Amino acid sequence: MARCLIVFLFAARLFGQTAEGDARVQALYTQAKAAQASGDIAGAAAKYEEILRIAPRLGPAYNNLGALYFRQREYGKAAAVLERGLKADPSMSSAAALLGISLYESGEYARARPRLEASLRANPADANVQMFLVKDLSKLGDYGAAATHLQQMGAKTPKNQEVWYLLAKVYMKLSEQALARMNSIDPNSVLAHELSAEMMESMNNYEGAVVELKHAIEMAPQRPGTHYKLGEAYSSLSKWASAGEQYRAELAVDPGNCLAQWKLGSIALQQNGGAAEALAMIDKSLGMCPGITEARVDRARALMKLDRNEEAVKDLETAAKANPTEPSTHFLLARAYRASGRAAESQSEMRIFSKLDEAARAATAQRAEEVIQDKETAH
């Protein structure tokens, strides 16, 4: 059943609503309450229906009857009664919200949308109505509007996991729509191949990504960024020579690509190339883009190979400040401190490294256990 606040209205507004607000109506209302309290929902509904035959413009009676039908999951009946009630008394906000939800539960998504939107405008703090609106918009395929509401809800309740779950699903639907639209224009375009490569990379299918990116480069060899992406795919496969070739090809197309420049220096370090040569490449990269934290770490590695440990310390301190939870940076900083004769600081960094590394290993082990459990559950 929907988690919504069902408000029962009546006594305070009975008299003055209609001339028929006499003892008979009051008695029926008392009987309806008693029937409801004893669990006789059908009996309570019958009493409200009788009230409405006597006082057909008594709005709260419609509200209460609609709420009873809603509790019984008779959403079609609830919607019909609530619509009649709002004609009698348009000011009943609880009835308006319940009507939108009833229409949604009845599968009347197009009819539910304006009701839910109007209810939310009247009470922007009603998270329950907003959640039903999100679900209604998703049923209608308006994922952009649903995403907007979910972003608002996430800002208000950042720890509401259901909001982020639904937002992730909405983003996936938007992605599917965008991909379908792009393929309808030209399924064999450069962009189509690049996007296909990115999707394969997200599934760790780097060999497939390489194939797609090669197709893209054949079609547009001078397109900036594609050679760099292919270099990244080769790097994920530890094919360093091929990766370096693509990074150099990228720089030939786009000399300002500081990431490609840095990656060449990083490869030189990984392949035991000359530290001085690697340092020159990384310095050139940082000259273009000083904010690349990973390049700072690689620069420090090169400096340490050249016994320029004090300079390495400065880069590693900058990197640790930018990303304090990365264990490897603290490990390198401990080594650089030790090589610089700063034993106490080295020990402090090793303690930080140990804590972060232990936490990272525990998180990895937990994720692995969850994957195993999921597989066992699936079987």
Image (tube, helix red, strand yellow):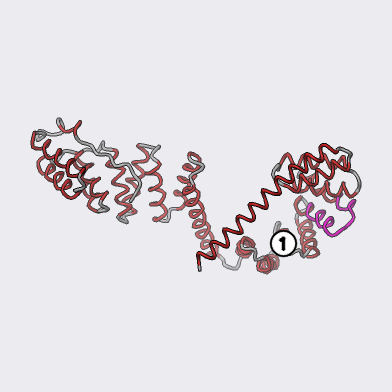
Percent position of residue 307, x then y: 91, 46
Residue range in magenta is: 262-279
The kind of residue tagged 1 is Ser
Picture layout, residue 337 above or below residue 269:
above
Percent position of residue 132, x then y: 38, 48
Percent position of residue 265, x then y: 82, 53
Query: Can residue 84 be spotted in the picture?
Result: no
Q: Quadrant of residue 372?
A: bottom right
- Toward the viewer: 139 or 29? 29
Q: Is residue 276 magenta?
A: yes
At 73% from the left edge and 58% from the top edge, which residue is drawn?
228
At 61% from the left edge and 55% from the top edge, which residue is drawn?
366
Mark 1 highlights which residue?
236
- Secondary element at tag 1: helix
Q: Is residue 164 magenta?
A: no
Using residue 26 as the reference point, say whether residue 150 is left or right of it.
right
At 34% from the left edge and 54% from the top edge, which residue is drawn?
109
Q: Quadrant of residue 342?
A: top right
Picture layout, residue 326 above or below residue 207:
above
At 26% from the left edge and 36% from the top edge, which residue is drawn?
91
Disc 1 packing (10 Å; few <14; some 14–19; many ≥20): some
- Toward the viewer: 226 or 203? 203
Q: How many marks?
A: 1
Query: Can residue 286 be spotted in the picture?
Result: yes
Q: Main secondary structure of the magenta part?
A: helix
Using residue 88 as the reference point, say whether residue 118 is left or right of it.
right
